[in-house]
Amino acid sequence: MYLRIAGGGDSLKKGIVFNIQRYSIHDGPGIRTTVFLKGCPLNCLWCHNPESKRKSREIFFYKNRCLKCGMCIAICPQNALSIENNGIKTDNKKCIFCGRCAAVCNTNAREIVGVEMTDDELMKEIKKDCIFYEESGGGVTFSGGEPLYQYEFLKLMLKRCKLAGIHTVLDTCGFVSEEALIGISDYVDLFLYDIKLMDDDKHKKYTGVSNVLILNNLNKLDELQKKIFIRIPIIPGINDDENIEMTGKFLNKLKSIEKVCLLPYHKIALDKYKRLNLDYNLADTEEPTEEKMEQIAAVFKQYVKDVVIGG
Amino acid sequence: MNERIKILRQKSLDEIPCISLERAEIVTETYQKYEGTVSIPVLRALVFKELMEKKTICINEGELIVGERGPSPKSTPTYPELCCHTLEDLEIINSREKISFKVHDKERKIQAEKIIPYWEKRAIRSKIFKEMSREWKECYESGVFTEFMEQRAPGHTVADDKIYKKGFLDFKKDIEQELEKIDYLNDIDAYDKKEELNAMLICADAIIKFAQRHSELAKEMAKLEKDEKRKAELFRIAEVCENVPANAPRNFWEALQAYWFVHLGVITELNTWDSFCPGRLDQHLYSFYKNDIENGILTEDEAKELLELFWIKFNNQPAPPKVGVTLKESGTYTDFCNINNGGLKIDGSDGVNELSYLILDVIDEMRLLQPSSNIQLSRKNPDKFLKKACEIISKGWGQPSVFNADSVVEELLRQGKSIEDARCGGTSGCVETGAFGKEAYILTGYINLVKILEITLNNGVDPRRGVKIGIETGDPRNFKTFEELFNAYKKQLHHFIDIKIKGNNIIEKLYSKYMPSPFLSIIISDCIKNGKDYNSGGARYNTNYIQGVGIGTLTDSLSSIKYHVYDNKNISMDELLDALACNFEGKEIIRQMLLNKTPKYGNDNDYADNIMQDAFNAYFNEVNGRKTIRGGVYRINMLPTTCHVYFGSVTGATPDGRKAWQPQSEGISPVQGADRLGPTSVIKSAAKMDHIRTGGTLLNQKFSPELVKNGEGIEKLAHLIRAYFKMDGHHIQFNVVNAQTLKKAQKKS
């Protein structure tokens, strides 16, 4: 099981976090802090957080910030860096992501993605905005990647947040063992549960995994009467066809779904792919029009009461 | 917005500001006639009388609230007794790209032949620059501080509810009573009191006359008017102006017109800073509104129309033309009338009423440069009120700004105001706290805190001018600890505040002696009771402010030095000072380290925020509690208007990575781009300042439209504001603009 990966060593007390977003207003009720945990079992074609996929550290390279001062080359213990015409070239085979280059880079052209944090350290960050949570009915949202990919750490964090009286949201793709999901479900006030495609072949094709476990888990949470918002990315040409109707029908059978959020595909992530030196496969896909989104929402409204476009 | 408002609003927007020398001529003639034969307060009252009796008046097409400061809308008077413009000044005013006023040849001729010969040496501005010490002038030249009163009068105050309860005939009775009470046997100030009170009497008669002239004009116009509807309106105007401000207003319309005459009186008597302001408008007008509605003589639409016509009157009066440093520190046509909405009632209960909501509608529809508008938000005010304000804010034209009514009360209480006076107070100008109608709270000038650090780093020398204006606190290269540096900064700060206040003491005396304001004194408690002018400490409360500028840049600069020079030894003081001296020329890598690898204010980071607190406390301790010669106390507030740009333009490169001559941070906002963790972090950092010990702080927050595009986003904005105010934040204003619009605007300018 994927989840067991998170079981060993010091990972119980340390998580790897790639972003902490404060004043996050699209990831659940109120003003929230969203903690992005690194690592994901899926490999969605449209992923807008490509830096979230790998569990280990990575390095963002912002070419436009680089002054070619060479400090990173001098400090690299692996000799993985060299200067070339357009900036600094990284030999990915040599790089061990130690982060020394990022530490000495005065322009932040090199930035470490994925910081190891203890539960204490992360709690300190989360608690910083308590006054805003209290005022707005907000709290913390764990997102990713797939936060359950760091199961032990996540469970610890959720427990600690509940102890501190902080409202918790878990944004999950659902591709986890049933026992893990149930294991944390007592500490989650609201699930943001992602559904991408109903057709399993297509699901495998575009996300790299089967949807059987995902849909079963959703059924399970529904049986347990957990509070759930369904989130569906709308990717033109991939899941905006008969899949909409199919998803609606599936959701119609569930009882605990409070809301469906339709997330229109966007290209904001393009820069991130560049920074990681990765190819982006959906460069030609257009963002769906508002009209199209309204149409899709209308279909869903036949099956679910509360349908919103966006967060 | 109805058709009438649409037309008049557009007219006000299209009108081009020009200079009118009518006021200057009347003032000069009056001085020539009476100077030396009457006391100064009476002379000033006679000037006011002549103005009210002789100035050209007009009733503009379609309007219902009447009266202009100049002969026509946006025709702007000058105040030669305060600032006598040279012909060169007039040319600059006429031709400058921004904040210009048309100056016609006729006006230039009058200025040259009549105004300059009389006022050149008599104007307050000339007197001030003659009296200031060499060291004061050096500091002024270096841009260590500005001087608010060098071409505009103190003012800085706001009306309370007394003009809605009493007419000027009633005020006259009060004045006469005090005249009778004067003890000529034992009171050494008896003569001064008599002259001041007599001056007030002259002014009271003058403002009544001014209103009567409008009444007569309205009647004449009505007789000639063909349109029956307009004819009736003109007769109504005549009736209103016949009654107010001689008597207390009887209805909503009269209440607005009464205020407007008072407003014109204050801004015609002298060129007061922040013009004048009705303050808590929804509180003052509510009883009239309610009565009129109940009695069926006013509808909600009519009330709204009158308010909108009232709004347009403000926009017709641009701030009189400024020159020199005063223009740089306050480069705008707006005259900072800032209407307060919401807040608390005198008994401490929720002040929001139906009119508060109606006024929000007016704010939303009018979108004029003037008047500014704000909500005073108390924890007792309903969320619905805040939400409605947030909806307007989300539309992205910067208003209304939001103030913490509970903090304002606490600030005023700390300063020794009574609880009732505090609750009836509010904020004016940009963000300044005041006990409305009872306090002279004078802003005396901005202080360039960042420049003082620069001078500290140069052992007392202003490197831009190569002049030693500070004291020798030692070569920073020899400082062993950050504390040594910070102590040196505090010594320099003390030195410069001393110089500033020495100057203030003279300037205050000049106004007290030569430029009393008997009309303003009638309406600010307790000038009548004390028989003392507003400019001489007659008000119930007297406060002087020095406004601190650049706390963000100062904090980040100190943080850079502490972090890189002392704590981590990434760079020596010598290297840092070299980099600053050459404006980072060839030292970009060092600059990038200072920019990107330093704990910065605005990120809820205690390393930087603790430094901010130390810098704030150093400034507070230096200024707060010093005595003013009017019997008041010095306080601080933290606001810049546009002075952070001017102060930036005279300040070299700074240790936070800012290049020479670039703007400094604004108000208590972080340095532009230094806050990287979003609005909650900015707010947390800003709230670590002790707002209660100030008389106002200014926090501007840029917000992407994406964050407030729907009801949920707007609700979260409201929560954000409530949370800031829970932490005692004083003020927050949102500029909802996207990055692209900002970039475009920057290119244009």
Image (tube, coloured by chain):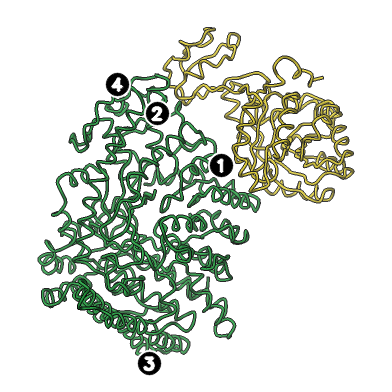
Chain colours: A yellow, B green
Provide the residue designation for mark 3. Answer: B223
Q: Are labels 3 and 2 assigned to the same chain?
A: yes
Dot 3 surroundings within 10 Å: few (below 14), some, or many (20 or more)? few
Considering only order in the chain, which callout, 3 or 4, is on the residue closer to the N terminus?
Answer: 3
SS at mark 1?
helix
Locate residue B191, reporting x and y percent: 19, 75
Residue type marked 2? Ser
Disc number at residue B574? 4
Q: Specify whether residue B395 is in view.
A: yes
Dots 1 and 3: beta carbons under 8 Å? Answer: no
Q: CA distance from mark 3 to mark 2?
A: 73 Å
Residue type marked 3? Lys
* Residue nearest the viewer, comparing A291 with A11: A11
Q: Quadrant of residue B241?
A: bottom left
Locate residue B726, reporting x and y percent: 56, 50
Residue type marked 4? Asp
Choose mark 4 or mark 3, whichever is in front: 4
Disc number at residue B560? 2
Considering only order in the chain, which callout, 3 or 1, is on the residue closer to the N terminus?
Answer: 3
Q: CA distance from mark 4 to mark 3?
A: 82 Å
Considering only order in the chain, which callout, 1 or 4, is on the residue closer to the N terminus?
Answer: 4
Choose mark 3 or mark 2, whichever is in front: 2
Q: Exactly how many numbered labels are in the figure?
A: 4
Provide the residue designation for mark 1. Answer: B680
Badge 3: chain ID = B
